Image: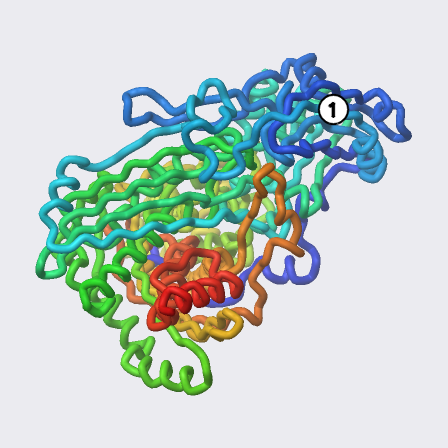
Amino acid sequence: MRAFGQSQGGTRREDHRFLTGAGRYIADTIPQGALHAVFLRAPVAHARITALDVEEARAMPGVAAVWTAADLADQGVTASIFGAAIGDRHGGKGAAPHRPVLADGVMRHVGEAVAVVLAETRAQAADAAEAIMLEHEDLPVVSALASAGAGAPVIHDTAPGNVGIDWEVGDADATEAALARAAHVTRITVRQNRVTAASIEPRGAWAEWDGARLHFAFNGQGVWTMKREMARMLGLEPDAVRVTIPDVGGGFGMKVMVYPEHFAIAAAARALGRPVGWVPERGESIASDNGARDLISEAEMGFDADGRITGYRVRSRFNLGAYNSQFGQNIQTVLFSRVLTGVYHIPAAHLGVQGIYTNTTPVDAYRGAGRPEAITLVERCMDMAARELGLSPFDLRARNFIAPDAFPYDTPSGLAYDVGEFGRVLAQAQDRADVAGFAARRAASAAAGRLRGLGLAYYIEAILGDDAENAAIEFGDDGRVRLYVGTQSNGQGHETVYARYLADLTGLDEALIDVVQGDSDRIARGGGTGGSRSVTVQSVATHGTVEAMIDAFAAFLEAELDAGAVRFDDGIFSAPGTNQRLTLAEAADLARAQGRRDLLRHERRVQLPGRSFPNGAHVCEVEIDPETGALRLDRFLAVDDFGNLMNPALAIGQVHGGVAQGYGQAVCEEVIYDADGQLLSGSFMDYAMPRADDLPFFGFESVPVPSVNNPIGMKGCGEAGTVGAMAALSNAVLDALWDQGVRSVDMPLTPQRIWGWLQDARRDAA
């Protein structure tokens, strides 16, 4: 085989299809004649349903059916929607309250689905939904973490005090002792604002029933969990369910999950014998999609007299929303703990965390899923410690890095980092960001009446999800080669990198390679996309499949050509001592001619020996107008260790997108509920998204330290930009405001909040 196939260039093969309007998204694929679904949603955050009259709606023009929880029960759909309950610190498990498909007796958050209308047109369904008579008796509301403490109304009887999970990791006693003997302890509290994914394509789905099998299509991040859960919820055999995914306009973790709407429209399609499609509007998505982040963390970091960390303790409370979402209990517990101590050697650490139910939309994974939250906390703590200790933030980090000769390094949470040269990466970032010239730029900003700050964050993230993956390679009779993958592109460019890698390994014509994804009938197993796993795990599976395929063809050719050991180099099979030379495509043609169809398809499942850990330094500079609080991001540099790059252009694109989303949360995005649980940021008029002119040109440099946990030496890159950006931006803003007397900032760093912090500091100084 050819070498790894890394550092491939060229344009994305998907782009022409997408840019010319030939993409096929969920709304483009709804079958002809499908009924349209519209959901009646809870108008209040917590209430008992006293009356739900749908008769007038059922009689309206074009309406085929109107279903409530009672109608779903008649169809046998009564099970609880999947939401993991993990082990807790007391030896049991977290709470597992029932989550119905449609609200059954009680509504627990604004936007919860209460009824579904099926009609010939969407307009008819929407009109009928408005005709449903819903009466309710208000119940006390818990709208935020701050109001969910002792004495708060209980949302679920199975969760006293609204505590869904009480969890810990690390050594509490050793950490307490380390902090007690520390020469200095830095303490900081960080709030993570709630955000929504706001993918360019809202969630949607359609379903059809042929009398024996269900075909369910949705714009998700993998087909197998949906297949399993659809069979469970509808009482079907797994073989009676086919799940497909067309082109997807962004996922960011939010589209991994199963949602109530999925099961309602599938049950309706089966019962009515007609296809059913559902495509929501943006406001509906913001109200019903899983939220993200939404936690408050208190950190204590101890240092000895030489500025080396002795212990680190974190206590967090995070918002679960009204129900367990698919991974809700995992995000700020298990996943947060994966990078609890970042890139630092910390002898003793402990994380204690509680997940709290509130009357808000469930909270789950979003780009980074726990790692941005952990890194933001530890990096803000390091920055504050540097100020308190009178050290450079670069120097304090460097003296506490895990040394290169300490790998593999076991973290306090039980993860083993494989490799790392953090000092080399940081030194390059410091040089390329021209940190030495910052003082002059700050003086120039001051002369113009502006405040300039420099922010640094050094992140590490752990590749998550299934560490095994399937790949299959099939030679078609039409001359094309199909690569079946277990991951799912949401716009990242998978088709390009997968096809190019297979071509590079085998010498096959890339133009003749089709990447097949998102169909449970065509791919027996796969882990889907999430946790920055896709290119790393899928490429290793492809590599393993190619190895098995080459071995099989070599054995065939040795017998067919009556030759000695057949070799495969640079895309050519050859037998030493003969002039026999065949490409892989020619070998496949020969196998077909000889009736060896078993050689025309090869499949393998490969498990990584360990995970990889992308890491890097983000350095940014902001400028603030002290009269208005307006923030301008002036510079942003990411120096990243992604190991061997498979495709530099795609990696840079992922970093740019990740930084933009990190900027969005850090500066302008926030989902806000009032005290009654009403959503106040339910449209893009109120939920502020970053714009192109908010962002400068991003700098990117690669400092590869190849992973030893996969044969390609690569590391994931999909979430890295977000993981590092939030802390870097927060640290930059605090740096800009520090000399004005501001000692604490929190996201989002809006003009109003920055102006308020400045006013508070001026009053305190007076």
Which image quarter is the C terminus in? bottom left
Residue 700 vertical position relative to residue 229 in the rendered view, above or below: below
Q: Tell me if residue 675 can be seen.
A: yes
Horizontal placement of 72 versus 484: left or right? right
Residue at the image point whose x is 53% and y is 52% from the top: 670
In terms of depth relative to the viewer, which is nearer, 545 or 619?
A: 619
In terms of depth relative to the viewer, which is nearer, 190 or 570?
A: 190
Residue at the image point whose x is 62% and y is 47% from the top: 680
In terms of depth relative to the viewer, which is nearer, 715 or 683?
A: 683
Horizontal placement of 524 versus 172: left or right? right
Residue 592 drawn at (x, y percent): 51, 41
Residue 501 drawn at (x, y percent): 42, 55
Q: Helix or strand or loop: what does disc 1 sit on?
A: strand
In terms of depth relative to the viewer, which is nearer, 751 or 433?
A: 751
Instruction: For label 1, count other residues whose C-alpha is less than 10 Å away and answer few (under 14), some (14-19) or many (20+).
Output: few
Q: How many labels, in total? A: 1
Residue 1 vertical position relative to residue 104 in the rendered view, above or below: below
Residue 161 drawn at (x, y percent): 42, 25
The residue tagged 1 is 135
Given the current orientation, which residue lies at the most extreme right position?
61
Given the current orientation, which residue lies at the most extreme front position?
766
Q: Tell me if residue 524 can be seen.
A: no
Residue 262 drawn at (x, y percent): 63, 31
Residue 643: image quadrant is bottom left
Give the residue type at disc 1.
Glu
Which image quarter is the N terminus in? bottom left
Which color mode does the image show? Answer: rainbow
Residue at the image point whose x is 50% and y is 69% from the top: 629
Horizontal placement of 354 versus 499: left or right? left
Residue 728 vertical position relative to residue 436 in the rendered view, above or below: above
